[in-house]
Image: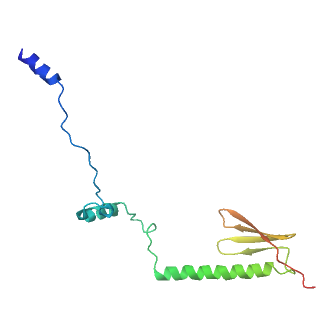
Amino acid sequence: MKIRAAALIALLPVPALAGPLEFTFVNPSFGGNPMNGALMMSRADRFRPSDPVLQNTKTQADYFVEQLQRRALSSLATALLSDLSDASGAAEGSYVFEDFTLDYVRQNDTIRLLIDDGMQILTIELPSYAFDTD
């Protein structure tokens, strides 16, 4: 009899004893507890890449070398376009650089540039600005 009474009491509906759900920010950047700042930074540090290739570890000398390379290529491109715009220039030609090859072909009113870097070939068509001075 006691077992049946206990089973009946266990099957009776019981009111839920829970409060409303409330959301609070954890990250102090979004209004959370400012004491969590160190915790959030330590978590972020765990996911930061440790590979030096993925990190920005360039020195001023590295930036300077990159700028020199860009300026040299820019000067080279200016000289190349100057040569291509000359009406008495060759109808086709090729320039070989350290990392890529540039071939050009003059066709009517356009100049077709083919840049081969060993992985892909990029084709650029430029209008021919060559004019005859006679």
Q: How is the image coloured?
A: rainbow
Up/down of 5 relative to 99, above or below: above
x, y percentage for residue 34?
25, 64
x, y percentage for residue 13?
18, 26
Position of 62 with respect to 40 (left or right) is right
Q: Furthest residue to the right? A: 134
Position of 117 with respect to 44 (left or right) is right
Question: What's the residue at 85%, 74% (across, down)?
Answer: 91
Which corner quadrant of the image does residue 33 belong to? bottom left
Q: Nearer the viewer, residue 9 or 128?
A: 9
x, y percentage for residue 43?
31, 60
Question: What's the residue at 28%, 51% (across, down)?
Answer: 23
Q: Nearer the viewer, residue 81 or 17?
A: 17
Total marks shown come to 0
Q: Quadrant of the N terminus?
A: top left
Up/down of 47 relative to 70, above or below: above
Q: Furthest residue to the top? A: 1
Q: Nearer the viewer, residue 38 or 46?
A: 38
Which corner quadrant of the image does residue 74 belong to? bottom right
Q: Furthest residue to the bottom? A: 134
x, y percentage for residue 103?
76, 70
Up/down of 22 relative to 35, above or below: above
Which corner quadrant of the image does residue 134 belong to? bottom right
Question: What's the residue at 85%, 70% (across, down)?
Answer: 109
Position of 13 with respect to 61 (left or right) is left
